[in-house]
Image (tube, rainbow, N blue to C red):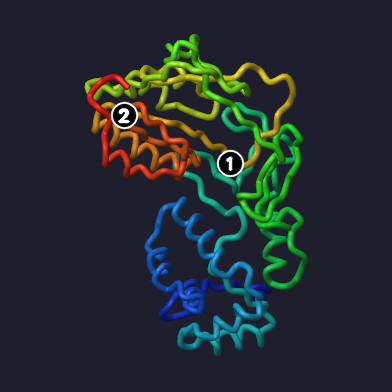
């Protein structure tokens, strides 16, 4: 009995020479950038690469993309082989990308999005959030092959689940994901530096008055991570031990009077002054990491000269360090 469906990989199987992604990048003048993306290997890098490529031609008509693919080089015998399969009654398909939500998980985690669970790290997940991924993939492939409608879950560019409301929501872009209102909380500590978790500073909707600055000391002779190494080995979504770490500034809000939806980008704005060049460089690296991870914006300022522009570049730190005194 002949198979009913034959699915081919494109790059290196049906195609020779440039990959399908390189072929599509050429008409939009992105060949050099595509060559760099082809070198990426980690899951996070590949995910970011897919988003980048989509931004190049995601809004192009399908017919136009098909014309671009005329520039691809087919492997010897590919046309003849496909013709024989069609003559035998087979349906043919080709793929060069993962199906939706087909992200791999790190080795230390469960099966990622391919195996949704009703509980993660002891946290109960709403029934509506647990998808039948096989069904979703089947519907998506039917749509991709022209045999069905696009799955309702994928009707917009961004799909996210709002806990509490227990519903899926949609947005045209990540920047458009929002609860519809801003929640602004200000750091406040009347004594300046919060002592610890049990004597923390406040996150308050009210703008605080004049307060002494909070001071964070970085001593290269200390290794605070060693104090929590045992707990860190089993850290998960419900872990609380980092709130007890030394050399940490802890601020928290009072309980909200009513339910608050949080969706979209969270941003932390700080005005920082460093009294040593080494501390300045450490803050710079921390800034770069957070800018990528959580969209935080940290401003370095010379003592007594706090900038009110969060977009000031970190290079100012190199140009004039704060004097060697408490700031």
Q: Tell me where residue 298 appears, x and y as whole percent.
A: 43, 36
Residue at 63% from the left image edge and 77% from the top image edge: 92
Label 1 close to label 2 by CB (< 8 Å): no
Q: Secondary structure at mark 2?
A: loop
State whether residue 281 is above or below residue 193: below
Callout in the foreground (1, 2): 2
- Please indicate whether residue 327 sits to the left or right of residue 169 in the image: left
User: Residue at the location (38% across, 45% down)?
Assistant: 313
**Which mark, residue 19?**
none
Circle 1 sits on which residue? 265
Between residue 26 and residue 276, name the one nearer to us. Answer: 276
Task: Please identify the quadrant where the C terminus is shown.
Answer: top left
The residue that appears at 61% across and 88% down in the rendered structure is: 83
Measured as percent of width and height from the top left, residue 142 is found at: 71, 66
Which of marks 2 and 1 precedes in the sequence? 1
Q: Is 271 on the left or on the right of 184, as rendered?
A: left
Q: Could you say which disc has been placed on residue 274 in the image?
A: 2
Instruction: Classify residue 142 as left or right of residue 55.
Output: right
Category of crowding for the residue at label 1, using alpha-carbon neighbours closer than 10 angstroms: few (below 14), some (14–19), many (at least 20):
few
Cα separation, mark 1 vs mark 2, equals 27 Å
Secondary structure beneath disc 1?
Answer: loop
Say few, some or many: other residues with alpha carbon within 10 Å of mark 2 (under 14 / 14 to 19 / 20 or more).
many
**Residue nearest the viewer, comparing 133 with 211:** 211
Q: Position of residue 175 (x, y in %)?
A: 61, 49
């Amino acid at each position: 009995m002949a198979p009913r469906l034959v699915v081919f990989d494109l790059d290196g199987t049906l195609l020779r020479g440039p990959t399908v992604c390189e072929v599509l990048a050429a008409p939009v003048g992105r060949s050099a950038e595509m060559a760099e993306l082809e070198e990426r290997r980690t899951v996070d890098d590949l995910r970011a690469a897919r988003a980048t490529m989509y931004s190049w031609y995601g809004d192009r008509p399908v017919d136009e993309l098909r014309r671009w693919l005329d520039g691809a080089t087919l492997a010897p015998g590919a046309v003849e082989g496909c013709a024989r399969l069609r003559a035998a009654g087979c349906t043919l398909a080709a793929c060069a990308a993962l199906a939706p939500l087909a992200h791999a998980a790190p080795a230390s985690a469960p099966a990622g999005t391919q195996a949704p669970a009703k509980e993660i790290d002891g946290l109960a997940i709403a029934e509506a959030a647990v998808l039948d991924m096989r069904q979703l993939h089947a519907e998506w492939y039917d749509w991709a092959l022209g045999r069905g409608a696009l799955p309702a879950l994928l009707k917009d560019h961004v799909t996210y689940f709002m806990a509490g409301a227990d519903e899926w929501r949609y947005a045209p872009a990540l920047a458009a994901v929002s609860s519809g209102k801003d929640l602004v909380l200000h750091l406040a500590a009347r004594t300046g530096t919060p002592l610890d978790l049990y004597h923390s500073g406040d996150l308050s909707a009210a703008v605080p008055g004049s307060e002494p600055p909070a001071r964070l000391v970085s001593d290269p002779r200390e290794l605070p991570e060693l104090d929590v190494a045992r707990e860190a080995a089993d850290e998960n979504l419900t872990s609380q031990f980092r709130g007890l770490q030394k050399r940490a500034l802890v601020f928290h809000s009072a309980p909200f009077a009513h339910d608050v939806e949080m969706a979209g980008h969270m941003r932390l704005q700080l005005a920082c002054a460093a009294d040593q060049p080494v501390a300045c460089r450490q803050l710079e690296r921390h800034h770069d990491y957070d800018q990528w991870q959580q969209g935080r914006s940290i401003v370095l300022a010379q003592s007594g000269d706090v900038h009110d522009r969060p977009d000031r570049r970190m290079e100012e730190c190199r140009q004039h360090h704060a004097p060697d005194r408490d700031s």
